[in-house]
Amino acid sequence: MCLAVPGKIMGIEGEDPIFRTGKVNFGGIVKQINLAYVPEAKIGDYVLVHVGFAISTIDEAEAQEVFEYLRQIGELAELEENHTP
Amino acid sequence: MRFIDEYRDARAAQQYARALKRITTHPWTIMEVCGGQTHAIVKFGVDELLPSEVTLVHGPGCPVCVTPVELIEKAIEIASRPNVIFCSFGDMLRVPGLSKDLLSVKAAGGDVRIVYSPLDALKLAVDHPEREVVFFAVGFETTAPANAMAVFQASRSSVRNFSLLVSHVLVPPAMEAILSFPDTRVQGFLAAGHVCAIMGFTEYEPIAQKYRVPIVVTGFEPLDILQGIYMCIRQLEEGRAEVENQYSRSVRREGNLPAQKLIREVFRVVPRKWRGVGEIPQSGLGLQERYAAYDAEARFGIAHYTAEEPAECMSGLILQGIRKPLECPAFGVRCTPEHPLGATMVSSEGACAAYYQYRRRKN
């Protein structure tokens, strides 16, 4: 029920903040999404969408945190070692 | 897809699994609160990567599963009326009431429609001014801003043939209820990331302190969950009980302030019954007095309905983390997704449905 899917804002419409919407691209599927709750979001940003509403903008820097943390706990070196291109 | 695929990297998952084995010295039981996390754990086999000392129990975070049978009965009653278009998320249609479900109302000619968003229901009301359009507003804090917006827009645009059957529940009171049970096994929580995207996580800090449990705000992909478990185990091993945020790419400490503002505008905190658990004080949302005109229970005169839960289903114990689906004698025999005894077998996020889909053959 609390499923939320990340998508990229392709365009923004609407003057009234309550009715502000945007075209959001989810891996090729584009939907009209209400942007009232992410007033800071702009074209090109990724937002997390739940039942037609963007509920959060995704922080690009923080998105690396899962891998940063792994590096910090001393495992990423081994990960890279095992990763043969 | 970006922000999904990278968090399913098998090598990084193995690294987290090894790191977890290194730091785990005691048996620990952690509850993932959200049904979306339960689903991901069982689907991707995250639990099978964990050290044998770590047990995951599945929490009450499936709004479909915790909606009490009397609200299902109210939905069935409203949906059966001739002038009504009854709108709902798809999951609710097969949740058993006392004698039937919403899908059988639809089969008998009721106008029951599955919508993606409450705004779709509002649009139906605008397009059909001669009909009564009712939206079944179930959900946790994640969904509350969407339902609040539907009511707010209806009010601003003077749409009068629209109402909500509200069954909104709140996560922190349920976590406190679980911690207060005398036979609780839960020593740490993975808090529901999307609930916290809306509400932030300051309200979990007093819970962590009072009950001495670590609470880690956690996302929904396998690496998110593994990192969340790692952070939780690390706190347990070090004797800490703090609120930490694994899901920082989407969750800020204060949450989404415009969304919280509209929730407060439209809803107020009320006591709610949880299916299989009973009434929990201050654990739900109901419409504010000033939006009472949008309350379907009042509009259709059914606020007084009550109904008792059927006895055979043990979903209450499953939702509290006391039992697991495979321990139920009815599982997969008398209770299947086609013929569910309880809601945990219906919803795609219900623990029983997740085990049925991914674990039935293996076991």
Image: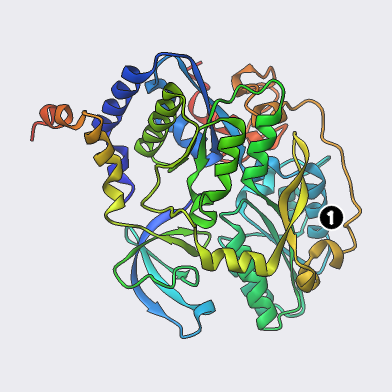
Mark 1: give few (<14), some (14-19) or many (20+) Cα within 10 Å. Answer: some
Asked if one can make out residue B184 in the rendered structure from this viewpoint, the answer is yes
The residue tagged 1 is: B77
Nearer to the camera, B83 or B183: B183
Residue B106 lies, in percent from the top left, at 73, 54
Asked if one can make out residue B45 in the rendered structure from this viewpoint, the answer is no
Residue A9 lies, in percent from the top left, at 35, 68
Residue depicted at 50% across the width and 64% down the height: A53
Nearer to the camera, B229 or A20: B229
Residue B352 lies, in percent from the top left, at 60, 30
Is B322 situated left or right of A78 in this image?
Answer: right
Is B360 situated left or right of B1 in this image?
Answer: right
Choose top left, top right, bottom left or bottom right for residue A18.
Answer: bottom right
Residue depicted at 74% across the width and 38% down the height: B275
Outermost residue, bottom side: A15
Q: Amino acid at mark 1?
A: Glu
Q: Is residue A37 above or below residue B110?
A: below
Residue B266 lies, in percent from the top left, at 69, 68
Q: Is residue A52 above or below residue B353?
A: below
Residue depicted at 56% across the width and 60% down the height: B116
